[in-house]
């Protein structure tokens, strides 16, 4: 089964836009979540065998009866130093790592809009889009 990528705009609280609102029965080990909250981007990977208490933003436990031992675990980005990237960058573009240092980002031709629509561009023209379903 392939990994799923979820996008949210809140960490906890159980509302549809919160990471903890995703039904645990839908989640599988290694699923990825990207949360954009007040100018900060959080990257999470789902661990399906984690009994840690919720400690936002580091560990997020899905709400509901199907959470069990599933936890969203915040991932460290970079390796102890500033991350650099293109100047200017493309608004809403998904950044890509350049090399293996964990410190240099590249721009991309894929964007995630505020309404969770993912767009794919070539030559400045949107070729395709996907609307993420929240919930």
Image (cartoon, rainbow, N blue to C red):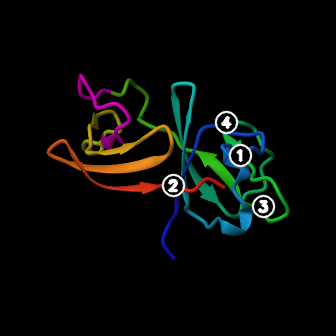
According to the image, label 4 marks what residue? 57
Quarter of the view holding residue 68: bottom right
Q: Which mark is residue 67?
A: 3
Label the magenta part by its dominant secondary structure.
loop
* Left or right relative to 5: residue 69: right
Q: Earlier in the sequence, mark 3 or mark 1?
A: 1
Quarter of the view holding residue 106: top left
- Where residue 5 appears, as percent x and y from the top left, is 51, 57
Q: CA distance from mark 3 to mark 2?
A: 22 Å
Q: Which mark is residue 60?
A: 1
User: Magenta stretch containing residue 88, yes or no?
Assistant: yes
Q: Residue at x 51, y 25 (%)?
A: 39
According to the image, label 2 marks what residue? 132
Q: Tell me, yes or no, whether the two marked residues, 3 and 1, touch with CB atoms within 8 Å.
A: no
Disc 3 secondary structure class: loop
Q: Earlier in the sequence, mark 2 or mark 4?
A: 4
Q: Tell me, yes or no, whether the two marked residues, 4 and 1, touch with CB atoms within 8 Å.
A: yes
Disc 1 secondary structure class: strand
Q: Residue furthest left?
A: 123
Q: Which label lies toward us, 1 or 2?
A: 2
Q: Nearer the viewer, residue 42 or 123?
A: 123
């Amino acid at each position: 089964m392939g990994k799923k990528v979820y996008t949210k705009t809140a960490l906890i609280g159980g509302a549809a836009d919160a990471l903890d609102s995703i039904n645990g029965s839908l989640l599988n080990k290694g699923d990825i979540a990207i949360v954009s909250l007040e100018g900060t981007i959080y990257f999470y990977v789902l661990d399906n065998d984690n009994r840690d208490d919720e400690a936002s933003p580091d560990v997020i436990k899905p709400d509901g009866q199907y959470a069990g031992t599933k936890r969203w675990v915040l991932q460290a980005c970079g390796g102890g130093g500033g991350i650099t990237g293109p100047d200017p960058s493309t608004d809403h573009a998904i950044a890509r790592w350049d090399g293996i240092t964990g410190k240099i980002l590249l721009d991309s031709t894929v964007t995630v809009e505020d309404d969770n629509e993912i767009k794919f561009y070539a030559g400045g023209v949107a070729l395709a889009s996907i609307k993420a379903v929240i919930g």
